[in-house]
Image: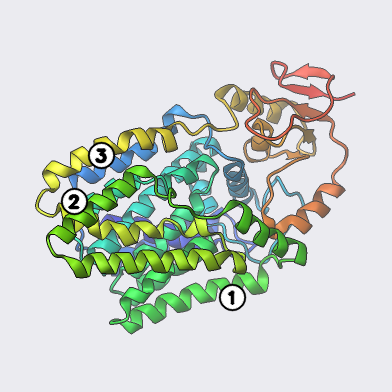
């Protein structure tokens, strides 16, 4: 993508995200917001970034659109169900009756806009788009505030070589990658209006990811108007969510902090061995070339991020969601070490990235197969809209709300709505159907058996 194209597309995503922040918003507002955002991007976005042949390698992130039936992860089933809610005028069919005055639905807005292609395919396309947004944001920061050579090529190598954020795809963390990318792109802009749109859109996509990317506003201290505009837009969306969004109960707050400590810690392998080796080699080469200031700046950024990661769980924030910022700290070393040798090093680096990319991204296993998706289409025909369907948490049952619009007994839930969804699920009538997916990815199978088989035996009508 050229600089102008990136500005238009990311402006459209940010505009749709902001437009769908109110709980009453629907897909029409997403369209209007997307068009306005694209117009702002065309008018105010930077155009200096040129074309890079090697950056076309990021197209690999779209391969699962043709190789997978749905995007991996229960989280992704939740986000696509929210997209269905945008289309049909509800928060989510997985959470019947649950409403919120404001909710961050930027990623789901992208899915909703792509829903004419089918929600399953739209989810996969939006997941791929999240990595293109992250690549665009990293490219913009490298070329702008950090002034690194071959920014777009180095960013493409970084996204494909590093374990994080590629590993987010395995569990459905793509909104985080998209939000960080939007925030990075906004922080690299020269126009305060467009920076504000990107930072606001990032917060309306994933508040935690937006806060991570917004840390790069510190690099814009020489242009205070831009930093202030971006910071105010971010704060405005976060304030709207704090006032009108879900209110965290003591139980939900405790769960957040416990999960941050137990499951979201960042270790030395968060970027993966290939990225760590590339960083070590680049640093050694630059030290040999006596580029001490550059290496020291990168080391200081790394130490600062490590210190931040240690503090985040105390605030209920997940260090792993901030880990992609490590690429901002190390990729300038890669770029300067490889300067003048990019035509030789870029293809070699991309070849070296293939094994990790295959393992962390292309081999990610969804909880629903193509046969499951076909069975869920049958569910939509064989059950009334008011039906409640029992099934396991870790199999294709999780996709029924998104693809068929039916409630299930064990939907994936967001921590901010634990209390509300508990109450909503308690009000559901007794399940009259049970769905059995082709594979159980995690968790326990649903209890019980027996019933009239429907949909090639995947759906049972309970007696």
The reply to whether dot 1 and dot 2 touch (C-beta < 8 Å) is: no
The disc at residue 272 is none
Residue drawn at the location 75% of the way across and 40% of the way down: 410
Q: Mark 1 points at which residue?
A: 239
> Percent position (x, y) of residue 376?
65, 28
Density class for disc 1 (Cα within 10 Å; few <14, some 14-19, many ≥20) is few
Q: Mark 2 points at which residue?
A: 51
Residue drawn at the location 66% of the way across and 74% of the way down: 243
Density class for disc 3 (Cα within 10 Å; few <14, some 14-19, many ≥20) is many
Q: Is mark 1 on a helix, strand or loop?
A: helix
Residue 445 shows in this picture: yes
> Percent position (x, y) of residue 264?
56, 54
Q: Distance of mark 3 from mark 1, alpha carbons?
A: 42 Å
Q: Is mark 2 on a helix, strand or loop?
A: loop
Whichever of labels 3 and 2 marks the residue nearer the N terminus, that label is 2
The reply to whether dot 3 and dot 1 touch (C-beta < 8 Å) is: no
């Amino acid at each position: 993508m050229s600089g102008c194209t990136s500005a238009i597309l990311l402006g459209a995503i940010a505009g749709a995200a902001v437009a769908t922040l109110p709980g009453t918003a629907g897909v029409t507002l997403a369209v209007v917001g997307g068009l306005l955002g694209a117009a702002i991007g065309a008018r105010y976005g930077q155009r200096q970034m040129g074309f890079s042949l090697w950056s076309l390698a990021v197209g690999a992130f779209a391969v699962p659109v043709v190789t997978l039936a749905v995007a991996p992860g229960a989280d992704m089933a939740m986000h696509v169900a929210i997209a269905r809610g945008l289309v049909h005028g509800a928060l989510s069919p997985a959470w019947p009756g649950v409403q919120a005055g404001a909710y961050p639905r930027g990623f789901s807005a992208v899915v909703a806009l792509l829903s004419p292609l089918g929600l399953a395919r739209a989810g996969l396309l939006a997941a791929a788009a999240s990595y293109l947004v992250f690549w665009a944001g990293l490219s913009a920061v490298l070329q702008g505030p950090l002034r690194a050579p071959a920014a777009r090529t180095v960013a493409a190598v970084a996204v494909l070589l590093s374990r994080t954020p590629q590993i987010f795809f395995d569990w459905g963390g793509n909104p985080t990658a998209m939000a960080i990318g939007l925030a990075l792109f906004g922080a690299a802009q020269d126009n305060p209006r467009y920076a504000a749109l990107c930072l606001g859109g990032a917060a309306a996509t994933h508040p935690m990811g937006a806060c991570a990317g917004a840390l790069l506003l510190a690099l814009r201290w020489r242009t205070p108007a831009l930093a202030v505009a971006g910071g105010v837009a971010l704060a405005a969306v976060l304030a709207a969510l704090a006032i009108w969004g879900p209110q965290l109960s003591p139980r939900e707050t405790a769960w957040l902090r416990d999960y941050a400590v137990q499951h979201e810690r960042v270790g030395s392998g968060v970027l993966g061995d290939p990225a760590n080796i590339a960083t070590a080699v680049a640093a050694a080469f630059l030290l040999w070339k006596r580029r001490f200031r550059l290496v020291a700046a990168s080391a200081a950024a790394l130490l600062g991020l490590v210190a931040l990661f240690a503090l985040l769980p105390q605030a209920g924030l997940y260090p792993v969601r901030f880990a992609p910022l490590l690429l901002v700290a190390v990729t300038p070393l890669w770029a300067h070490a490889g300067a003048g040798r990019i035509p030789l090093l870029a293809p070699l680096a991309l070849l070296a990235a293939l094994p990790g990319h295959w393992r962390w991204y292309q081999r990610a296993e969804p909880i629903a197969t193509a046969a499951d998706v076909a069975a869920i289409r049958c569910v939509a025909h064989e059950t009334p809209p008011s039906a409640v369907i029992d099934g396991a948490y870790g199999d294709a049952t999780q996709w029924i709300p998104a693809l068929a619009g039916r409630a299930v007994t064990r939907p994936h839930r967001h921590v901010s709505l634990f209390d509300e969804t508990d109450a909503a699920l308690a009000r559901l009538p007794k399940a009259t159907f049970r769905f059995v997916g082709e594979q159980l990815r995690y968790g326990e199978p649903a209890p019980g058996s027996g019933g009239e088989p429907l949909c090639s035996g995947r759906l049972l009508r309970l007696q």
